[in-house]
Every structure is written in C-alpha cells, then in structure tokens.
Image (spheres, coloured by chain):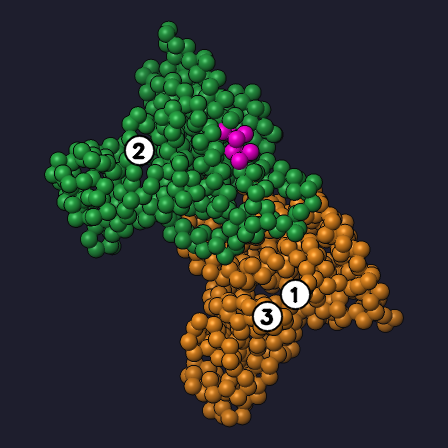
Chain colours: A green, B orange
C-alpha cells in the first residue's frame, strides 16, 4: 500500500471497491440493492490512473482513482495524486459550463483521490479509436467547438472579474506536478536526449536528431513553453487530445481533465487539432485495398477546419453577448466603437489562432519523438510504413511551428499539408 | 475607527503609535530607552497609506500603516489593507535579493497592517523631487538596473523551478485589489470618460479626447493590459515610478512595493523608464534664465539609456551564470549550443524591451490624462507651459506604444524624441 501524506489513502482493487461502494450512499444509491453482484471492470488505458466501470442490474458508474505515481512508468516517477482534486474540480466546472459534453460527477473523495462519475456508456468509444477505424462523427466539430468555446470563454477575463480570475488561478496553481509533467514531456524532452524518448527506430533516428538540432524550432518551442508556464488565460483542460474524448454518432463527451490549470487557451485547441492532424497523417498506414481512406482523410480535414471555424464563431458570439458583462479585460466603455470592437476581436482571435497552431505542432512532435505515442501510428504494424506516416506528420508540424504566424485561416493550414 | 474583517485593527495616530512602539520589543529596541520623547512625523505623501518617521536620540524607524481605502480619494474608494502583507512580503524578498537597494523590514503586524522598517534617512530624497530640481544622480542607472535585474531574474522561471514559481504566483494572487486598481487607473480610465480622470484643462481637452478616440492606441493598450493581468513572469514591484525610489549621490533605495504581484517584468522597467521620460519632458517647464536644463536633459536621456543597457547586461549575465541552475524555463540540455543560447537571450530580451516600452508609454499616458499626476508636471505653475510639456510627453508616449516593435535599441527610442 502506497500512501502520500494523507491518512487513509489506499489503492482499491475490485474487492475493496465493492466495500467502498456499499459504504458510500451517494454511490450505492446509483446502483440499487444488488451490490453483491456488481460487474466491475478495470479499463484504465491511460498513463496515470486506475479506472473501473461498475455495473449493477439497475445502474452504472465509473470510478477513477489516482495513484501517487505515473502508472505508465511506475513508482519510479512519483506524481501527486492531488491531481484527482483538480480533475474533480475541473469536471464539475466544465460540466456546469458545457453540460451536454462533460459527464456529471456523483462523488469525490479527496482522501482516496477517487472520483465517481456518470458512466459514458457504449456505444461511446474513445474518438481516437474511431479515427483509427475510419469512422466519421458528423457532430464532432460542432460539439468540440462548443465545449471549448464555453469552457474557455467563461473562465477567462473576457467573462470573469479580475477578483474571480486571480482566485481561480491561485487555486489551480497547486496542480503544479502535472504541469511539470507536461513541461517535460511536451516542451523539453523531445528537444534533447532523454531516457524516456522513443521513436520508430532506426527509420526516424535522423529525424529525431534533426529535432534536437533545430535551432529555429527550439526558439519557437521556448516561446510556447513560456506561454504554457506563465499565461493564465483560462481554465484549460490541459490534455485535450483525441483519447480524452468519447463519441457516438450524436454524442461527444470530454473526460479526464486532471491536467486542468490556468493556461493558454491555444493549448487546448491545439491539442485537439494537432491530434486530428496526427489522425490524418496516419490514415495512409491504415489504408488497404478495400478502403484507401481518401474520403476519410477529407472528412478529417473538414473536421479540423470546422472545429476552428465553429470555435471562432461560438467564442466571438459569447464575447459579443457578454460584451458589457462582468469581464474586466475589455471594458465596454473603452471598446464600444463598433469598428474598434471588430478590430479587438480580430486581433485576439488571430493571436489565439497562432497559439493554437503552435501548440498543435508541439503536441504532434512530442507524440512522434517523445515518451508517449498515439495509437493512430502505433497500430500501423509495418514500421517502414509507420515511419513514413510519422515523418510526414513531423515535417508538417515543424513547418507549422516555425511559420504559424503566416497563416490567416485554417484553410491556409490545410492547404499547406 | 474603521475595521475590515480582522479583529484588532485600528488606525494609529502619533499618540497611539508611541504606545504601540513601547509595547513592541522589536521596535522599542531600535529606539533606546527614551520612548517618551520620540519625534514622530507623518510624511505619507503617497496615495494610499500613513507613513510615520519615528526618531529617538538613539535610533530611528519608519512605520507604515495601510488603511482600508485609497487615501487619495477617501473612504468612498475601499482598498484592502491586506496589501500591507504583500508589501512586507515583497520588501523582505527584494531586500534578500538586492540588499543594498531595499530597506530592511524590522517588524510586520498583519492585524494592524503595519510595517516597521529602516528609516532611509536624509539626505535621501524621493528621486522625483531631485529630478524636478535638476539634480544629477550618477549611480541611479547602475543601482536601479541592479535592483531590477536581481529582483526580476531571481523570481522568474529563469531561476525558479515550476514548483517554486507556481507557489509564489498563488500567494500573490491574493493581492488582487491592488492589481484591479492598476488595471483601472493605468489601462482603462485614461481611455474612456471617467470621473477620476483629469488633465490640464482646457489646453489638453482635445488631446485627452484624442486618446479616448484612438483605435490603434486602444488595441495596443488592450494587449498590454492582458499581459499585466495574465502573464506571471516575475515578482514585480508593481509601482516602480520615480516616487518609489529614494536617492543620495551614492545610495539608491527602492520602497513601497505594495503593488507587488507576479506580472510582466516590463511593467517595472517601463514604470521607471517612463517616469524618467516624464521628467525629461517636464524640464522645459522648469528651465529659467539661470539654467536652461539642457545638460540636465542630456543626463536624463543618458540615465534612461544606461538603465536599459545596464539592466540588459546584468540580467543576461545572471542568466548566463545560472544557465544550468534550478530554473526550468530554458533547460541547459536543450539550449547548450552556444549560437542557440545567444539567440534565446536575444529573442527574450527584445521581447522584454518591447514590453518595457509599451508599459512605459502606458504609464506616461495615465499620468497626463488619468487620475494620478506627477510632481514633474504639477510643479510647473504656468498651465500653458505645463500643457505644452505634457502634450509633447503624451505624443511621444502614443508614438512609442504604437510603434514599439520597430525599436531595436534604447538609443533608437531616445533619438525618436
């Protein structure tokens, strides 16, 4: 049993989980009376936690427990399980702001680092798996842009007062361990020799070395890292890749915000868009004689374009709606001139666009030459084919990071592929 | 008696101050045994607090007490006296980092919002008064650049770990009332109709209106305001104008960091340089037949140039010294290539230069058309002459804010006057 400062913490297994549920009315009430016949399945395929699906004849819940180390690496890489508190806090806030796209939290136990929430039931799957299989999700861009617009706008100074903002910033500063993990694996390790880095060797050996020796790229990534560390723009999800999103044809659920903190909005937008680009570049590795994936690649590109364009529309629309609201960044009395108001939004959104592209590129690069890879590429069995897909993604990401300020529209970016 | 949540707070006067000192060993020990014959003088010429100089035959101290409103305005503008806690905390930290240029704190009483510190004794005067009188301070740039380089470098991610940095950021987030004051009086009020704004009327009526109608300027000030609100770059003094600095020919003491919080470094550098520019533009109003102030104006310009250039040198030198230190922003293993290391510093410093110019301009503008003015101009009796000086300062500041990114060196800026 590993403990970490807080009395009473213990890592649960299926047996002790049943006892925990029986002793916790807010959970047992969701599952009815037959608590001795719970179906419990551990499904934590992420890098950090244990996740149990608990099903009874009359209900279901998901239980997520953080352990005080990085599960992917083991106890040799300690990681504060207090991240669970921030995940629960962020889940509740995001559910409040975007209830259709974030599961409800039923119960949080800080001592146990344990969150119980709505089970996002089948046929929901992790969207990354759908992207590997070539399944289209016609509402994905609509839903994700809505989730991002709502959660980012309403937690920024465009809507909050300075007092509310600084108080929330202070609260999430304590989620620092998880921020350090991101700093390391996204912004540092891929650009130096690190025991954790890996890539499709030997095919990408020269490419990985080129990343480590690319001065212009390293200057750009430094600027992005500074924004990540210093810019308290909004409460961001912090890990918004395509494995943090569960989908069906008509539902989109964003999960796992344990990396949440006050950071740059572009980090979330870039994470999602960057992972869609990874999905795009992996498609040739999944093509076969039956399906060349050509129309699917077009759908991914359209989804990328729609995500940004719909986000832009929804976000600026929220801003217009609340232009004389509580937000203290752009006081209505200063910016009430109509032409100026349009200029303000244009300038803000183009800056956010360039940030998003930069972070998208950083997230792509780290998935190819850093510690944690993505199923999009990993599931391509032939290493030559995989390396070829990865190299094209890597070259594209490097180009985007270096020249992102030259792009004006998302269509420009897509044309550059 | 005004109280504010915290039991036991009371505003002191000269009599009750003596009782307080007698009851506080850390203070009475500084003043010897003759505590019934203390010379006490209230000298708070600032906008916010009461400041007492306390002198006995055998010692001296300064006592500063915050009251729960803006003293300049009165009780109608409440202001948390908890700023006193942040002032004491910042004073101690800055004294630790730059002991020759920050007075020592002897005693802090959070309940009473009371700081006792070393009396910065005569012939020290507020440097603004020296600038109005035309007195040269040959070490001012050397000392101020040292203060800024040390306090900014060592509290930034160039030296701190992410863990230390986020913890300090969180702590100072609670100094939010004072940040809101700055947001209002520096970044908002001058750009809209506000009951608090004033200017040399009627001479500058059109100039003040032009500021309120200048779209490009308002776009720029929005960007600067966002940095002020969102960028947690270093522990900044937050109010580093020329009335926060006391000088003699060979000593420079920085006081009054009650506005301290984690913000953009350029806000401090800009405050100091901007106020030197204000002093420069005011000189023609102080010139007379005996002294046309020509060589003094040159000295001010040289001091501005030296301040930035020496800051640049000292700051980058600290960075070089600690390049493989604890700071997590630019890991040595990523940036060890010599050419890249130079590029990193160049890019960082040019960004900081442009930030500093932008904030300098914002601080100048607000002193001419906002609520709080400066003695440099206020002491010019003839309003026509004063308005002429102010207009030239205002026009220069507007130009700098709009075109700051075109300047490469401080000499370029000075040439543009």
Question: Residue A355 at x, y = what percent?
Answer: 53, 36
Q: Is residue B67 left or right of residue B327?
A: right
Q: Magenta part of the protein: which range?
A: A307-314
Q: Is residue B408 left or right of residue A73?
A: right
Q: Nearer the viewer, mark 2 or mark 1?
A: 2
- Residue sticking out furthest to the left: A36
Q: Which residue is mark 2?
A: A120
Labels 2 and 3 touching (C-beta < 8 A): no
What is the spatial separation of the Cα atoms under label 2 and label 3, in whole angstroms?
53 Å
Question: Residue B27 at x, y = what percent?
Answer: 46, 82
Residue drawn at x 44%, y 31% as measured from the top left: A143
Question: Residue B383 at x, y = what percent?
Answer: 82, 67
Chain at numbered mark 2: A
Residue drawn at x 80%, y 63% as measured from the top left: B201
**Badge 1, how many Cα within 10 Å: few under 14, some, many 20+?**
many
What is the spatial separation of the Cα atoms under label 3 and label 1, in whole angstroms?
27 Å
Residue drawn at x 50%, y 43% as measured from the top left: A153
Q: Which residue is mark 3?
A: B76
Q: Which residue is mark 1?
A: B242
Chain at numbered mark 1: B
Picture quarter containing residue B310? bottom right
Q: Nearer the viewer, mark 3 or mark 1?
A: 3
Picture quarter containing residue A183? top left
Tag 2 and tag 1 share a subunit? no
């Amino acid at each position: 049993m590993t403990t970490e400062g807080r009395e009473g913490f213990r890592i649960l297994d299926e047996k002790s989980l049943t006892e925990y549920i029986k002793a916790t009315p807010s959970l047992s009430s969701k599952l009815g009376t037959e608590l001795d016949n719970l179906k419990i399945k551990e499904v934590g395929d992420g890098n950090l936690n244990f996740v149990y699906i608990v099903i009874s004849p009359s209900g279901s819940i998901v239980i997520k427990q953080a352990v005080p180390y990085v599960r992917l690496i083991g106890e040799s890489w300690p990681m504060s399980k207090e991240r669970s508190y921030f995940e629960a806090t962020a889940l509740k806030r995001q559910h409040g702001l975007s209830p259709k796209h974030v599961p409800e939290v039923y119960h949080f136990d800080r001592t146990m680092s344990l969150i119980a929430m709505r089970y996002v039931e089948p046929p929901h799957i992790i969207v990354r798996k759908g992207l590997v299989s070539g399944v289209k999700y016609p509402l994905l861009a609509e839903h994700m842009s809505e989730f991002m617009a709502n959660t980012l706008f309403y937690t920024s100074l465009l809507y909050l007062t300075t007092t509310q903002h600084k108080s929330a910033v202070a609260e999430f500063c304590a989620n620092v361990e998880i921020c350090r993990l991101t700093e390391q694996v996204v912004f540092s390790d891929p650009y130096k020799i690190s025991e954790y880095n890996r890539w499709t060797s030997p095919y990408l050996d020269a490419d990985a070395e080129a990343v480590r020796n690319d001065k212009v790229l390293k200057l750009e990534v430094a600027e992005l890292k500074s924004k990540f560390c210093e810019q308290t723009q909004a409460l961001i999800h912090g890990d918004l890749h395509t494995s943090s999103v569960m989908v069906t044809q008509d539902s989109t659920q964003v999960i796992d915000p344990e990396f949440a903190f006050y950071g740059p909005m572009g980090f979330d937008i870039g994470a999602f868009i960057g992972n869609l680009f990874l999905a795009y570049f992996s498609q040739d590795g999944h093509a076969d004689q039956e399906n060349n994936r050509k129309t699917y690649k077009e759908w991914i590109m359209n989804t990328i374009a729609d995500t940004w364009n719909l986000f832009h529309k929804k976000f600026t629309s929220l801003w217009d709606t609340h232009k004389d609201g509580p937000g203290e960044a752009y006081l209505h009395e200063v910016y009430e001139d109509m032409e100026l108001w349009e200029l303000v939004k244009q300038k803000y959104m183009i800056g956010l666009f360039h940030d998003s592209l930069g972070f998208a590129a950083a997230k792509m690069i780290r998935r190819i030459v850093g510690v944690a890879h993505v199923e999009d590429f990993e599931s391509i069995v032939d290493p030559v084919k995989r390396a070829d897909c990865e190299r094209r993604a890597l070259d594209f990401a490097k180009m985007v990071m270096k020249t992102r300020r030259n792009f004006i529209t998302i269509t420009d970016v897509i044309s550059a592929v």
